[in-house]
Image (cartoon, rainbow, N blue to C red):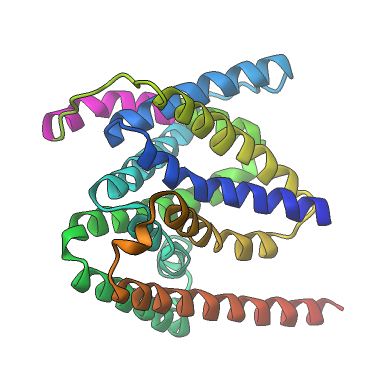
Amino acid sequence: MKGALIRLHIAVFLWGFTGVLGRAISLQEGWLVWWRMLIATIGLWVMLYFFKGITKISLKDFLKVAAVGTLLALHWLTFYGSIKYSNVSIALTCLSTTGLLSAIIEPIFFRRRIDVYELILGLFALGGIALIYATNLSFSTGIYVGLISAILTVLVSVMNKKLVSGYKPQTLMLYQLTGGFIGLTLLLPVYELFFPAQQKIPQGYDWLWLLILSFFCTILTFILYINALRKVSAFTVNLTLTLEPVYGIILAFIFFHEDKTLSKYFFWGFGLILVAVFLQMFTLVKQHRKLSANTL
């Protein structure tokens, strides 16, 4: 159990590190994600080929998985776009609202009643975002794009819940990355019409950061995450995932000193979001304990 928790925290830490790498890579967000998906997809195909882990699926199933993979690509594109238009801290603050957004979006998809308490917590989070927006207007575009990224990752999560039961985790990831890469490749020329990139080929250290992003923060994190899931409950995983923006923001403060460029109201706004997140975590803990007590 202890080893599984360590692996899980390493995976979450590496996910938090993706924001720092996104800012360090000089490529525009569209090409950054394209190269990330290309390298990760090739790496995963090679790895699963040698370990005989490739499972064939039908074209119909591939198209379903590829559609979710394309949404994942768009999530990454908007996440890195948010970083480019603002900074790592702003992008991750927007991303920290995903747990609360899912409390609203998931009931719509699964036809459940929306919890009023979770709706109130969502208003707390929106209040935090509004405070950050009002006091950091120079980052307003980054905030808009970051919130779109948060919505997209919730949609990916919801759709994966409908898909995950029918596939092995490595099969799902393989075809999602492949389908997402194909989808992004088809969409990128349209994106280029509105947001043309001056640089399309990685330069210098970009290659190193992309390799780290693709192998360590994509493939390795997936392996660590899946191994942890075998020993750790989904409840513990969900609580640990809330630390991803916290890790990422701390890293942004260390590497880029972003704390010096943000107003004090950013920290008040982020504090409001954290209050909402921790209250939601407290609610989950209570529900988990109650459920455990009922099963005894």
- Residue at image position (44%, 28%) is 37
In the figure, is residue 30 to the left or right of 279?
left
Decide whether residue 95 is among the magenta residues. Answer: no
- In the rendered image, the vertical position of residue 248 relative to residue 77, given as above or below: below
Quarter occupied by residue 180: top left
Quarter occupied by residue 36: top left
Closer to the camera in the image, 256 or 60: 256
In the figure, is residue 45 to the left or right of 103?
right
Q: Position of residue 153 (x, y in %)?
A: 42, 51
Q: Position of residue 114 (x, y in %)?
A: 44, 76
Query: In the displayed image of the protein, which residue is found farthest to the right?
Result: 296
Q: Position of residue 154 (x, y in %)?
A: 43, 56
- Residue at image position (18%, 25%) is 198
- Residue at image position (36%, 27%) is 34
Look at the magenta stretch and give its main secondary structure: helix
Quarter occupied by residue 28: top left
- Residue at image position (50%, 46%) is 17
Q: Total label count? A: 0
- In the rendered image, the vertical position of residue 287 relative to residue 235, given as above or below: below
Closer to the camera in the image, 218 or 238: 218
Closer to the camera in the image, 242 or 123: 242
- In the rendered image, the vertical position of residue 90 relative to residue 167, given as above or below: below
Q: Position of residue 293 (x, y in %)?
A: 80, 82
Residue 251 in view in this figure: yes
Quarter the N terminus occupies: bottom right
In the figure, is residue 248 to the left or right of 90?
right
Quarter the C terminus occupies: bottom right
Magenta residues (range): 179-194
Residue 61 in view in this figure: no
